[in-house]
Amino acid sequence: MSRIQNICVLGGTGFVGHAVVRQLVTTGRKITVLSRRPQRAKDLLPNPGVRLVKADIHKPEVLERHFEGMDAVINLVGILNEFRYQSFRDTHVKLPRNVMRICWKTGVQRLLHMSALGADAGTGKSEYLRTKGEAEQLLYIDSGDNLHITRFRPSVIFGPNDQFFNRFARLLRYTPWLFPLACSNALLAPVYVEDVARAFATALEEPDTYNQRYDLCGPSRYSLRELVEYTAKLIGLRRRVIPLPERVAMLQAFFLEMVPGKPFSLDNFYSLKTASHCEDNGLQRLGIESTPLEAIVPQYMLGKTQRVRHNEFRRHAGRDEDHSQSSPLT
Ligand SMILES: NC(=O)c1ccc[n+]([C@@H]2O[C@H](COP(=O)([O-])OP(=O)(O)OC[C@H]3O[C@@H](n4cnc5c(N)ncnc54)[C@H](OP(=O)(O)O)[C@@H]3O)[C@@H](O)[C@H]2O)c1
């Protein structure tokens, strides 16, 4: 029987959160997921042992109430862009600091924290990377004797509901013939979401991972351009990727930042200036074999090809009779 039974997950409703929660419940643990909008993650509920609770995690007293009696806390909260109601500093620095302090106060002894590859408080090129780096630093320096912290730093993460391949698939579809691409030479080593979740599950009860940090990468590195061209090929679109010169890319980011939902921002632009691949892949150190994207991405991109989408449309429109049966030519 595992020692860590009760786990509180922050950010458990997100893309990575779903994978982490699903892996943890297979081992019979009880998971409490705190969320601002739990109704958006009801699909987690059929997993035995999962409890979804509406909570404002930015209030220390709320965290305190929910951390009582927990054996471990996992913090996956992160944002790619700032909005009026959320800042990088509050989300990436203030919240992790509160989480750590309330772990001390409530006697939680294990904390797993999600950062990002390239995060660095001093040299991070974007506010996203600097604030993620600041949190890593404070969790390392101030952790204390009774709280064991492990930090994870993945490259871009892929999986069926990712915001990377899916987003490019969408953008490619709306952009005829030529696809202008900022930071086309940016280097990335995409890592599979299930491998990331396995890293969390493996580290949870492993004392060798205390106070360590793990860079998490897939087995190969690619330029952003290669990944976009691969996406276009998978969804059956002919698009010519046009790398944007630096200044034009910045201008694009400047304008897209003003579009609702911020599809791309200056901060994203600066994040892409940092190569996101591993010198020392933490998955190997954890005994996890990293999954190549070519083994997974085609499976979920297949549903996005024009032919499949057309067939889906016909089926919904009630026009999917098997015409081969009635054709006089067969
Ligand atoms: N996806 C990637 O490629 C990638 C790569 C490197 C690192 N990461 C890091 O991995 C973590 C998870 O990423 P993800 O892709 O799963 O993100 P996601 O799908 O956007 O999920 C983010 C989660 O964080 C919570 N959250 C976001 N903003 C919040 C705020 N202001 N206050 C409270 N809760 C907030 C959300 O919870 P509710 O909305 O339910 O409250 C949601 O569950 C993040 O820390 C991210 O920086 C991701």
Image: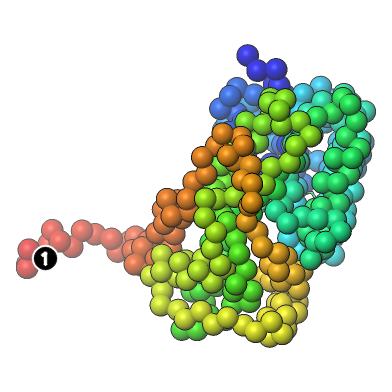
Label total for image? 1
Q: Residue at x 59, y 77 (%)?
A: 181
Residue 268 in view here: no
Q: What is the residue that sits farthest to the front in this orientation?
A: 279
- Give the quarter of the image for residue 126: bottom right
Task: Check the picture and name the quadrant holding the C terminus.
Answer: bottom left
Tell me if residue 81 comes above or below residue 91 in the rendering.
below
**Residue marked by disc 1:** 327
- Give the quarter of the image for residue 325: bottom left
What kind of element bears circle 1? loop
Q: Residue at x 65, y 36 (%)?
A: 200
Q: Which is more toward the observer, 285 or 292?
A: 285
- Give the quarter of the image for residue 112: top right
Residue kind at label 1, given as amino acid type:
Ser
Tell me if residue 154 comes above or below residue 265 in the rendering.
above
Tell me if residue 323 comes above or below residue 212 in the rendering.
below
Task: Check the picture and name the quadrant holding the N terminus.
Answer: top right
Residue 192 in view here: yes
Q: What is the residue that sits farthest to the left in this orientation?
A: 329
- The crowd level at tag 1 (other Cα within 10 Å; few <14, some 14-19, many 20+) is few
307 relative position to 221: left or right: left
Q: Which is more toward the observer, 151 or 61?
A: 151
Q: Residue at x 79, y 34 (%)?
A: 211
248 relative position to 176: left or right: right
Query: Residue 286 in the image: x percent, y percent?
Result: 61, 34
Tell me how the rendering is colored. rainbow
